[in-house]
Amino acid sequence: QKEVEQNSGPLSVPEGAIASLNCTYSDRVSQSFFWYRQYSGKSPELIMSIYSNGDKEDGRFTAQLNKASQYVSLLIRDSQPSDSATYLCAVNRGSQGNLIFGKGTKLSVKP
Amino acid sequence: GAVVSQHPSWVICKSGTSVKIECRSLDFQATTMFWYRQFPKQSLMLMATSNEGSKATYEQGVEKDKFLINHASLTLSTLTVTSAHPEDSSFYICSARDPREGQAGELFFGEGSRLTVL
C-alpha cells in the first residue's frame, strides 16, 4: 500500500461548483497534513495545513481530517478556472519533518 | 513568508557531465533541507535529507555517489548530479522549513530546477 494515495483524476468541475479532493494515508502516527497546489512546470505552493480532526476553513478552501479513517480532504468552493492545477496531498513523516506526497489529483475547472 | 531560492531554474547538459544545483534559504537558517525529484506526471519523491555540517541521509534506491549533496552553511545546500544520463532528466526541487516554526511548520519549496540530459 502506498503511503499517501490520491485519485489521479482528472477531476472536471464547472466554474462556481464545489471541487472535492480526497486523500488517504497509511501511517497512523502521522500528525501533520498538507494540501499543495502545483501548476504545470512550477513547484508546489501550500494551500492548507491541518493537524486536528475536523474541518479547517480558509477562504474558499476547507480541509477535513479524520485520523480514525486516515482520510484527508480538500473542498474548493466557488471553483474558478484559475484553480485548475494538480493538488498534492502531503503527510509529515520522520523526525526531521520531511513530507511524503501523494501522486496528486489534476483538477480542471471549466468556464 | 520564508523564501527558498533555487538556481539554475533549468539546465541542459550532455550525457556524462556533472550538474550542480543550488538551494538557498533567504530569510532563515535551515539546518535541514530536503531534495525532491519529480518525473513527468509523477509525484514528488524525496531523494535525500541534507543536514548542515554532516552527511546527507539518502532515501532507499537513491545513489549517494551519483547525487552528491553538500550543506556547508545554514543557508545553502547543493545537489550535484554526477555523470548525468538521460534518465536523470527530471524536475529537482529543494525545500526547507523555518526552524522557528517547528517540525509542523510549512515546508517552503524552491522554484525547482529542470534538468535535461542529452
Image (cartoon, rainbow, N blue to C red):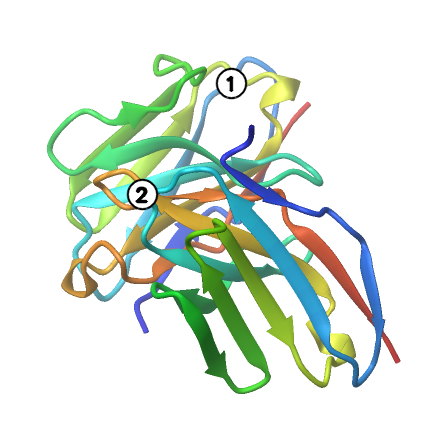
Q: Is residue B57 above or below residue A24?
A: above
Image quadrant containing the N terminus of chain B: bottom left
For badge 1, the amino acid type reads Thr
Image quadrant containing the C terminus of chain B: top right
Q: Is residue A55 above or below residue B117?
A: below
Relative image position of residue B13 (x, y in whole percent): 59, 27
Q: Check residue B17 in the rendering and tell me which mark sits there, or answer none.
A: 1
Circle 2 residues within 10 Å: few <14, some 14–19, many ≥20:
few
Relative image position of residue B35 (x, y in whole percent): 39, 38
A64 relative to A81 in the view: left or right: left
Along the viewing direction, whichever of B50 and A61 lies nearer the viewer? A61
Q: Is residue A6 above or below residue A47?
A: above
Q: Residue at x 15, y 64 (%)?
A: B100
Q: Secondary structure at mark 1?
A: loop
Q: Chain of mark 2?
A: A
For badge 2, the amino acid type reads Val
B88 relative to A100 in the view: left or right: right
Relative image position of residue A85 (x, y in whole percent): 70, 62
B8 relative to B86 in the view: left or right: left
A102 relative to B70 in the view: left or right: right
| Residue sitting farthest toward the left | B53
Q: Secondary structure at mark 2?
A: loop
Along the viewing direction, whichever of A82 and B13 lies nearer the viewer? A82
Q: Residue at x 64, y 19 (%)?
A: B87
Q: Check residue A29 in the rendering and tell me which mark sits there, or answer none.
A: 2
Q: Residue at x 48, y 83 (%)?
A: A58
Q: Residue at x 30, y 34 (%)?
A: B49
